[in-house]
Image (cartoon, rainbow, N blue to C red):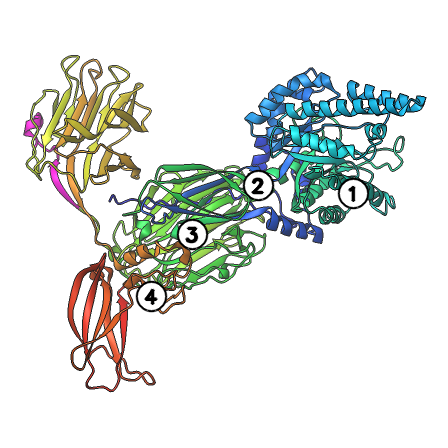
Amino acid sequence: MIQKLIKKIIFGSLSFACSVVGGEALTGAELAQIENAFGITLSSNDIAQLSEIVYPTNTPVWRSDAYARIDAHRKADLDIRVFDQNGDPVEGAQVSVKLKSNQFKFGGTFSIKDFSGVTNPDMTMSVATYKQRLLTMFNAVGLNNGFKPRLDGLHEYLPDFKNWAASNDLPVRGHLLIWPGVDEVNNHLTDAVLADVRAVEAALTNGSSQATIDALRDALRTTARTEMEEWAALHDVVEWDVINEPLSNHRVQDALDDYDVMADWFKTAESNKISADCGLRINEFQIISAMSEARTPGYYTDRRDRYMTEINRLLSNSAPITGIGFQSRIKHEHRDPQLIYDRLEEWATAYPALTMAGTEFEVQSSDSTNDWKWYIYTDEERAQITEEMMTQYFSHPQVDALTAWDTIGNGDTELVDYTGTPARNGLVWYYLHRIRFNTDVTLASGLNGRTGLRAFKGDYDLTVTYNGQEFVSALTVTNDESIAVTLNSTMAGDPSTAAVIDAWSYDGLSNGAGLSSAVSTGLVGGVSTPDYSLASVQNETVRWQSDGMTDSLYRNIVPSSSAGVSNGLYQISLDFLDADFSASAAVSNGSGRVVLGVRSDAAGDVNFRLVFDSGGGSAPEFRLEATDDLGSNQELATFFGTTLDHLSVRAVYDFDNAGSTGSYKVYCRLNGGSEIASYTAGQLPPGFTLDQLRLIVQTYNGGVNWQAGDRVYTDNMVLRSLGEPPPPPTVVALEDWQMNEAAGANLSGLVNSAGSAVWSGDKENVQTDGSGNLLFSVGANSSDNLYRNSTLTQNGVTNGVYQLSFAFPSATLAGGDAAGASVGFGLRDETTSSDLFLIRLQRQNSELRLQTRIGTTNTDIYDFNATSLPGALAIRAVFDLDADLMDLYYSIDGGAEVSETDIVINDGVMDAVRMACSLNNVDFGAADFVAVDYLTLSRINESVVSPVVFYQSWLNNFPALGVRTNLTDNPDGDAFDNLAEYGLGGDPTLADFVNVPVLQQGSGNSLIYIHVQRSDAAERGLSYYLELTPDLAAPAWTNGGYTVLGTNIGYAAGFDAVTNLIPTGAEASQIIRLRVGINYP
C-alpha cells in the first residue's frame, strides 16, 4: 500500500462548556461570535456589563445546583469511533459535531405584521434582517397574535410565515385555540362565538325557558367546537395552547354552565390536529412567576390551587392534555431564582406525566399610576432575571421550552430593537442559547479510533473527514449514544499505526481534573504528569489558562519504555486547540509559549513550540518555532490574529543520523488542511539520546507576559517508535532519463541510464538545451502536437507500488489560446490504448496550472495565478497498481512538499511511459516554452514491519480495551494476559480459553504437549517455549527436558501446531507451562 503521511486532525472551537466560573470574562472567540451574529461592535462597557451577567463574581448554591442538573439532564455522552474499510481504527480523523438545534426550545414570539413587512415607521431594519435576527436568537418560534382566531385581519400573513419556518426547520408554537373571554371589555372571542354567548346570556337574563336556553347552549357548543376543529386542522404546529388563561377567562364555560367542556375542547384538538406529535397545553399567567409570599402573602398559593383544580378537572375527564403552560411574565419584584425552581419542582411532583413550559417570558415594569404593586426594572436587573430564568427552566428535566414574548420592538422588555440591535437582556439570551448551552466542536479520533464528548441533547450535523474523504450524517442525540463511522479508505502503511510508547488521553475524565489524572497508555505505559495549578481537564482536553500570577511550568517526563535510546526513529506529536490570547494581545508585551520536545541528558533539548506575540499590542500573531543543533527558536510558520482554532504538530527524531542534516523534522497541519513539511533540514546534536520528554508552559518568566484568562487547549500528546527503525522503502529506478545530452539531442537520442525503454518519433521543437533540460517549444502548425509512448523494459505490469517523478525547472505559457497548451507525463496501457493517469502543466484561463487527467476528467491540483512558473516545480507520483490509487507530491521553488493523496487512477496494465503535449501553434505561443529536467520511473519496495507494529495492529482490533493495552494487562480476567492472548489468537476482551494447549499420553513414559503458534512468529518477534518443574510448592522452572517432534504448518488460518515430547520417567511429577515471549524495544 502507499506510504502516507500521518494524518493528524485536531480539536477546534470548544464551545460546549457548561459551567460558570466566577470572575471569568468573555473570550475573544465569544465576542467575535456575538459581534458577527448581529453585525455590531460591542463597546468596552457592553462587554463588561455582559460579562457581569454571564460570568457573575459569585456562584450561589442555586446556580451550582442548576448547572449540575443541566449536565445530568440536558447532556448525553456521545462516543464516536472511526474505522477504515478493513475495520481497523482510524487515528487522526477530523470529527465535527455541530448542534443544529437544542432539544430544549429556546423560542420567541413576534409581530406577524413586522415579519411580513407591513409598514411600521418605527422599524428601520429590513425585513430580511428582521428574519435573520429571529434565526439568530431562537430555535422555535410563535406569534404574538397571528394564531388568535378572533384577529382575522392577521390571518392572510400566516401562509408565508409558516413556509419560512418550515424551510428553516423551526418548530412553530400555536397560540391559541380558544381564549374564553372575561366580559365585553376583555373579549377574546370570534364574532360567531361571541354572538352565541350573548344569546345565552340574554336568555338567562330574560328568564327564557330551559328548552330555549338548552338550544342556545347547544348552538354555542357547536360553534365553538366547529371553530376549533377548523383552526386546529388548518395549521401544522408543534403544540397548541388549547385554552388560554382559564382562571380569569371563563365566559364561555359560564354561559354553558359547564366547566367539563374544557376536556371536550382538548378532545376536539386531539382529533383535528395535523401532526400526531402535536402537544396540547393549558396556559395561565402568574403561576411560577407569581409574586413571592413576602411581597403578597397567599397570592401564589391561591392561584396555584385554582390552576391545579382546572388541570385535575381535565385529567378526571380524560382530556388528552400533554403539557402545562406557565406564561412566566416577571412583574412586581426581583424573585429569588431558587423560588422559581422550587415552584417548578412542586408542579413536576404533582404532574409527573405532563411536560412544562414557560410560554410568554418577559420582564415587565409597572409604575404607581396604574399598578398596586409597582416595580421598575433596570436594564441590569432585566438581564440578570433573563439569565436566572433561562438557567432554572433549562435545568429542570420536565421543562421542555422557554418562549420569550414579543421579542422585537422599541420597548423596555424586548430582546432586540427595531434597528436590529440586541438589548442587554437580548445579548444574555443569545449567549446562553447559542454559546453556553451549545455544542459546536471539531474533535480528533485518538488511539483506537475513538473520540467523544458530553454533548447537549438535540439535532446535529456529524462530519468525519480523513485523508480527503468526508462522511456526513444527521444525528439526533437524546440519550447516551455510541456511533461507528466506517470510511472508504485503509490505514495500511500509515505511520500513525506505528508502536505507541506513551500516549496521554483525557477521554472520560471529569472537568477540573488535574494533569496527574491522565496515565499514559502504550506497550508499557503507566506514566502520569504532576499537577499544575494553571492546567486542568476541560471537555476531555487540557486547558492551560493563566491566572495573572502563577509562574511557568517545566516538566521532565521519563517515558515508560525506550528511555535512553540512541538509535531508531521516534516521533512526538501534540494538538494545539482553540488558543485565545485576546487579553495578551491588548498589551505591548503580551506573549505566551507552550513547548514540547525531547531532552538528552548529554546533548540538551530539541523541541518545537507554539508562541503568541502581541506585536507591540497592534500586530498579534502565533508562531510555530523549533530549537535544534542548528539554532534556537527558528521560525517555521506564522498565523496572524489573537485566536488559533487548531494546529497539529509532529516532530520526527532520527537518532541513527544525529549530527546530520535531516535528523530532525517538524510537520504541521492547520485547521484540518494538508500537512506541511515545515522543517525538513533540522539536525539533532551528535550523541543525542531520548532520555526524557520536556514539556514547558511559559507564563511569566523570560520576558513572557501571558495575561489572566487567556488560554490554549492541548490534547493527544503521543510518543511513538516509528520502527527499530524499519528500513525506508527501497526506491529502484526502472527507467531514467536525466536529459544531460548535448544541445539539440532529439527524443530518440535521450539516454536511459536505468532501463532499455527508448523514445521515437523525433520533433524539431522538442530537443535538449545542453543545460540538463529537455525543451518543448511551439509546433509548426495547428495540429502539431506530441503524443509518444516509451515501452517499458518490463511491460505488462499489474501489481506493486511505483513512482513517476519529473521536474519543470522553468516554463512560460503566455501566448496562444487561453486554454490548451500543455506538457505532461503519465503511464499507459498499450492493450487498451488508454492512460492510467496523466500529470501535466496546463494553460487554463490564461494561467498555469498543475493538473491531473484521469480518463476524461481534468482536476486542478494547483493554480499558479501566473503565466510563468515562480521557480522549479518538482513532481512525484506514487501509485499502487493493486489499489488503483495515487498519492501526488509536489514542491515549488525548493519549498515544502505538498501532497494530494488517494487519487483514484484507471485500472489497467502498465506498459509504457506516456508523453502527451499540446504544442500546436494555436494553443502554444511563439515565445512559450516548457523545460523538463528529468523523467524517472521507479519501483518502491515495501519496508519490513517491526514486531511492535504487529502488536499495535492486533490491539487495534479491540478498541474496547481502552487503556488496558500493556503486554502484562489481563483486562478480561481469564488465565491469559494480553501477550498470551496475542500469541495464541485469543480475544483480550472475552474471558475464554481459545487455543488452549492439549496434553496427551505418549508412548511409554512420556507425554505429548501440543500448542499453537503464529505462522509468522519470527516476523512478529514472538517466541514459544515450554518450562517444566517437578514441584509447585518450590518451583524451579527450566526450559529443557523436552523435544520438539514436529510442526503442523497451516494447522489453522495464521497458525501452526507444535508437538512436543516430554519424558516422565525421571520425575514423580511434572508441571508444564507454555511461555510466550516477544522481542520489542
Q: CA distance from mark 1 to mark 4?
A: 63 Å
Left or right: residue 1027 versus residue 54 is left
Disc 4 crowd rating (10 Å Cα; few below 14, some 14-19, many 20+) is: some
Q: Secondary structure at mark 1?
A: helix
Q: CA distance from mark 2 to mark 4?
A: 48 Å
Going from the N terminus, do you reach mark 2 or mark 4 first?
A: 2
Quadrant (top left, top right, bottom left, bottom right) of the N terminus: top left
Going from the N terminus, do you reach mark 2 or mark 1 first?
A: 1
Mark number for residue 438? 2
Q: Secondary structure at mark 3?
A: strand
Mark number for residue 343? none
Q: Which residue matches tag 1?
A: 308
**Residue type (three-letter) at the residue carrying disc 2:** Asn
Q: Nearer the viewer, mark 4 or mark 3?
A: 4
Q: Which residue matches tag 3?
A: 716
Left or right: residue 236 versus residue 345 is left
Q: CA distance from mark 3 to mark 1?
A: 55 Å
Q: CA distance from mark 2 to mark 3?
A: 24 Å
**Residue type (three-letter) at the residue carrying disc 4:** Phe
Quadrant in the rendering for residue 964:
bottom left
**Magenta segment: does it hold 19?**
no
Mark number for residue 993? 4
Q: Nearer the viewer, mark 2 or mark 4?
A: 4
Going from the N terminus, do you reach mark 2 or mark 3 first?
A: 2
Residue 113 position, x and y percent, is 69, 19
1049 vs 872: above or below: below
Q: Nearer the viewer, mark 2 or mark 3?
A: 2
**Residue type (three-letter) at the residue carrying disc 3:** Asn
Start and end of the magenta stretch?
731-750
Residue 807 position, x and y percent, is 20, 33
Whether residues under marks 2 and 4 lie with C-beta atoms below 8 angstroms apart, the answer is no
